[in-house]
Image (cartoon, rainbow, N blue to C red):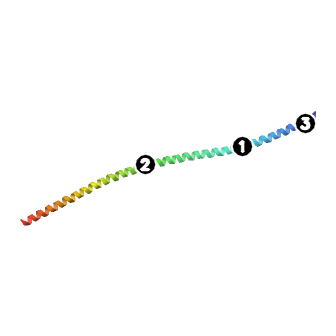
Amino acid sequence: MDERLVLESEELELHRQRLMSEAEKLVAVVRQREEKIGGIEKELNDAQWYLGEERTKRADLENKMRWLEQKCQDFESQIHHLRTECERLQKELSDSQWYLGEERARRQEIESRLKSA
C-alpha cells in the first residue's frame, strides 16, 4: 500500500508539474497579449491625438478660408464701387469735353463777330 501511495503521490506530483507548466505557458501567453493590447492602446491613443490635431488644423483652415472669402467679397465690393466711380468720372469728363467744345465754338463765333464789327 505504501508503494501505491508513493506511485500515486509521484503521479500527482507529475500531474501538478504539468499543470504548473501549462499555467506558466498560459501566464506567458496572457502577458504577451497584454503587451499587444498595451501596444494597440498606445496606437489608438496616438491615432486619437493625431485625429484631434488634424481636426484642429481643419477648423483653423476653414476659419482662414472663411476670412479669405470675406476679404475677396470685400475686394469685389471695392472693385465694383471703384468701377462705378470710374464710369461716373468718365461720363463727367466726356460731358466736360462736350461743354468745352461748345464753349470754344461760341468763343470762335464771338471772336469772328468782333473781327467783323
Q: Secondary structure at mark 3?
A: helix
Q: Earlier in the sequence, mark 3 or mark 2?
A: 3
Residue 43 is left or right of residue 81, and the answer is right
Residue bearing mark 3 = 6
Q: Secondary structure at mark 2?
A: helix
Residue 115 horizontal/vertical position (percent): 8, 66
Residue 34 horizontal/vertical position (percent): 69, 43
Residue 111 is left or right of residue 72, and the answer is left
Which residue shows up at 14% across the image and 62% down it? 107
Residue bearing mark 2 = 67
Label 1 crowding class (10 Å Cα cut-off): few <14, some 14-19, many 20+? few
Mark 1 and mark 3: Cα distance apart in space: 37 Å
Q: Secondary structure at mark 1?
A: helix
Marks 1 & 3, CB-CB < 8 Å contact: no
Marks 3 & 2, CB-CB < 8 Å contact: no
Label 2 crowding class (10 Å Cα cut-off): few <14, some 14-19, many 20+? few
- Three-letter amino acid code at the position of disc 3: Val
Mark 2 and mark 1: Cα distance apart in space: 53 Å
* Numbered tag placed on residue 31 in the rendering: 1
Residue 20 is left or right of residue 66, and the answer is right
Residue 44 horizontal/vertical position (percent): 61, 45
